[in-house]
Each structure stands twice: as C-alpha cells, then as structure tokens.
Image (tube, helix red, strand yellow):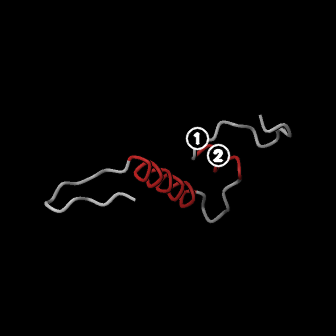
C-alpha cells in the first residue's frame, strides 16, 4: 500500500485510477440501460474485455 508523504506531495496509483475510471464507465452504462440489467456482453464491452465467453477453451 502506498501512502502519500507528509508535505502535500500527491502520489498517484495508476492501477487504482484505472479501476475507478472503469467503475465510472460501468455505472454510466448501467444508468443508461433504462432500468434493465446489463448483459454480460454489455459489461464486457464497457470494461473492454476482449476474450469470448462462449469459447470453452478459454482462449
């Protein structure tokens, strides 16, 4: 865990910032869905998942 040093210097955690951005995009997509649940395909598209869920080999 990173802790920002005392003295006003900000430390950015790039992984955390990327996760926050993806969560925000997912929340926006869910709110635009009009009260319906997002499909797995929609979630994958928002989160930019490139692998196919239907592929039994996992490739």
Instruction: Name the mark on residue 44.
Output: 2
> Marks 2 and 1, how far apart in space?
6 Å
Does residue 51 appear left or right of residue 19 in this picture? right
Q: Secondary structure at mark 1?
A: loop
Image quadrant where residue 49 sits? top right
Against 41, is 59 above or below?
above
The residue that appears at 63% across and 50% down in the rendered structure is 43
Which quadrant is the N terminus positioned in? Answer: bottom left
SS for dot 2:
helix
Asked whether disc 2 touches disc 1, contact meaning CB atoms under 8 Å apart, the reply is yes
Farthest-out residue, bottom: 35
Q: Which residue is the site of mark 1?
A: 48
Q: Quadrant of the C terminus?
A: top right
Q: Residue at x 86, y 40 (%)?
A: 56
User: In the rendered view, does 34 fall on the left or right side of 17?
Assistant: right
Residue 26, image quadrant: bottom right
Between 49 and 41, the residue placed more toward the observer is: 49
Q: Residue furthest top?
A: 59
Nearer to the camera, 44 or 12: 12
The answer to whether 18 is drawn above or below residue 2 in the figure is above
Near mark 2 (Cα within 10 A), the count class, few <14, some 14-19 or many ≥20, is some
Please state the horizontal and vertical placement of residue 11, each as a whole percent of the image: 27, 52
Left or right of residue 47, residue 1 in this image: left
Query: Which residue is outermost to the right?
Result: 56
Picture coordinates of residue 36, whole percent (x, y) = 66, 63
Residue at 79% across / 39% down in the picture? 58
> Which quadrant of the figure has residue 35?
bottom right
The crowd level at tag 1 (other Cα within 10 Å; few <14, some 14-19, many 20+) is few
């Amino acid at each position: 865990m990173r802790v920002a040093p005392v003295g006003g210097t900000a430390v950015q955690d790039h992984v955390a910032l990327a996760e926050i951005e993806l969560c925000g995009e997912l929340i926006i997509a869910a709110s635009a869905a009009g009260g319906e649940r997002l499909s797995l395909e929609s979630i994958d598209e928002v989160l930019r998942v490139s692998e196919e869920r239907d592929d039994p080999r996992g490739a």
